Amino acid sequence: MSEQFNFSEVFNSNTLRGRANVAKATIASVGLLYVLVKMQRRSAKRREAKLYCKGCQKKLMMNM
């Protein structure tokens, strides 16, 4: 691959291959966005869970 990447050639809307590449890129970006949002929500739940006492379920007073 010594040639330069030609964006307009790879994602050409006039060819079947170009349209397929656009669809693949769209699906990949939506999937990546989904994974990032899920990871963000999971870390927020973990942070919130650390604020509670496991035995008594009372909120702990922590200096943040």
Image (spheres, rainbow, N blue to C red):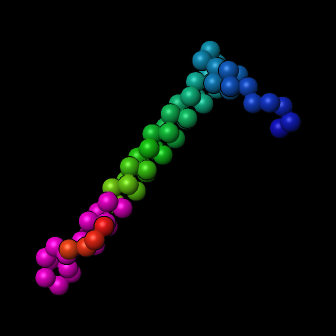
The residue lying toward the viewer, choosing from 6 and 10, is 6
> Taking 14 as reference, is 1 above or below it?
below
Furthest toward the right, the residue is 2
x, y percentage for residue 17? 64, 26
Residue 43 position (above or below residue 3): below
Q: Residue at x 56, y 28 (%)?
A: 22
Which image quarter: residue 49? bottom left
Q: Main secondary structure of the magenta part?
A: loop
Figure disc tally = 0
Q: Residue at x 83, y 38 (%)?
A: 1
What segment carries the magenta color? 43-60
Report whether 47 appears left or right of 32.
Answer: left
**Farthest residue, direction bottom:** 55
Q: Position of residue 25 (x, y in %)?
A: 55, 35
- Front residue of 8/18: it is 8
Position of 32 with respect to 49 (left or right) is right
Q: Position of residue 42 (x, y in %)?
A: 34, 60
Magenta highlight on residue 56: yes
Residue lying at 52% horizontally and 41% vertically, measured from the top left: 28
Horizontal and vertical percent for residue 15?
Answer: 64, 18
Q: Is residue 46 left or right of residue 24?
A: left
- Taking 39 as reference, is 19 above or below it? above
Q: Name the residue located 68 percent from the left edge and 25 percent from the top edge.
A: 7
In the displayed structure image, the side of residue 14 where residue 9 appears, left or right: right
